[in-house]
Amino acid sequence: MHPEIVRDRPGSCPKCGMALVPVAGAEDDNAELRDHTRRFWVSAALSIPLLLLAMAPMLGVMQPLGLSLGMRGYVELVLATPVVLWGGWPFFHKFSLSLEHRSPNMYTLIGLGVGLAYLYSLAAVLAPELFPPEMREHGGSVGTYFEAAAVIVTLIMLGEVLQLRAMGKTSQAVRALLELAPNVARRIEADGREVEVSLNEVQVGDRLRVRPGDKVPVDGTCVEGSSNVDESMVTGEPTPVPKKPGDRVTGATINGNGTLVVRAERVGADTLLARIVHMVGEAQRTRAPVQRLADSVASYFVQTVIGIAVLTAIVWWWTGPAPTYAVVNAVAVLIIACPCALGLATPISITVAMGQGALNGILFRNAEAMEKLREVDTLVVDKTGTLTLGRPQLVDVVVDGSDEREALTLIASLERASEHPLAQAIVKGAEERGLALQPVSNFESVTGQGVRGTVAGRRVAVGSRRFMQDVPEPLAAKA
């Protein structure tokens, strides 16, 4: 793939012949994948019996299915023709593009090798008299390359299908990032009315209301209200961050139990989420040093192989027993030299790695950074959310002067009324221990500090050390 090639529709790179990668935000078109998958299965269904027929004499079966040598050639022709001409048509199209743009690539060799093998075999079946007697087998027939041409087309088509599927998974990762953003926002008009508008209509300076549980529409600054905002999609930290007037908020983060009024400052492509998506898309289109090396080697390799094939034809033309040997040996050189793995392995591996990284929250600035990662032997991480499940879990309970189960029951009953991640972890831990939680009354939450209330007629408080110091005694339980 060449990053400088941009098209307004799905297709192939005119330089290397590989499928173009959708840019970030573009809708996927799976028509090419469906078409190639259909061509692969049809080609495979025809190539398998063709291969068995061609290999039967080598296994001691001289007349498979009772077919004579001459008749077997016609059967192979019938089986191979749809594979080569229909199944291999995308390769011949890419072969013509490589000639048109004077950019030899692996499809140049595939087109030459498969095309010449098929034409040679076609002549061997329909006009065996063109070949010298030395090349004829018993009965006057000439050996063919139908199975080689068909199997090459089938295997290359399999590689194309795998490549397109890999590209599709990468695009799904980018779409998953885009879906983090809400589709609409509640804009506060100059007269105080609140209007629900599309995210595309939000302008810099607009005042937006973010209700409890809603996603923050765009990047901006809080101007009214207070709440806790879940910024784990950016930071990886599960604990919500308190927000008050003057604090910055990030688009696609999730508001807690308070209401905020946000002044939009970055919209559209300028938001942090949009820039992350753009970075992922650009990284997929960059080329790692090893990929540039592979492209360079492939280019010289193709030209070298074509030169060797031409040289082979010239030598056999002058020194061989008949001119036909020149064509046979030149075709053999082209068939065995298709650099399919060289051309497919590097770009597919890079694209798949970036897509999987995006799905797992790992973003690469470019392909070179990913290649350098193999040299890293020590990884230092400054937050636990990226190494664990990303949510807290209750693992142990330590109490002083009271029963552990009774204390946990009171605390979890109070925390059930809170939406804080630590509170939810305590509730889940109590439920896993089989404790029956009780109703809570007079519940009060102090943002960023703790909660308090009454459980079964007993006063309970849970929070930070500073919060607990301000809570008057006596308490049934405190944590």
Image (cartoon, grey):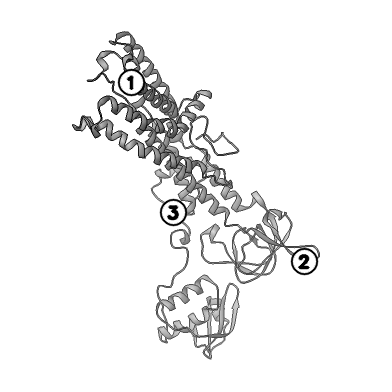
First reached walking from the N terminus: tag 2 or tag 1: 1
**Looking at the picture, does residue 25 appear above or below residue 410?**
above
Crowd rating for badge 3 (residues with CA inside 10 Å; few <14, some 14–19, many 20+): few
Q: Position of residue 455 (x, y in %)?
A: 52, 87
**Looking at the picture, does residue 355 appear above or below residue 424?**
above
Q: Is residue 479 visible?
A: no
Say which residue label 2 marks. Answer: 193
Q: Are marks 2 and 1 in contact (CB under 8 Å)?
A: no
Choose mark 1 or mark 3, whichever is in front: 1
* Rendered image: mark on residue 380: 3
- The one nearer the camera, 354 or 371, is 354
Q: Position of residue 84 (x, y in %)?
A: 41, 30
Spatial CA distance of label 2 from label 1 is 83 Å
Spatial CA distance of label 1 from label 3 is 66 Å
Crowd rating for badge 1 (residues with CA inside 10 Å; few <14, some 14–19, many 20+): many
Say which residue label 1 marks. Answer: 124
Choose mark 2 or mark 1, whichever is in front: 1
Q: Amino acid at mark 1?
A: Ala
User: What's the residue at 36%, 40% (across, down)?
Assistant: 45
Q: Amino acid at mark 2?
A: Arg
Say what secondary structure mark 1 lies in. helix
Q: Is residue 93 visible?
A: yes
Q: Are marks 3 and 2 in contact (CB under 8 Å)?
A: no
First reached walking from the N terminus: tag 3 or tag 2: 2
- The one nearer the camera, 272 or 479, is 272
Spatial CA distance of label 3 from label 2 is 49 Å
- The one nearer the camera, 374 or 70, is 70
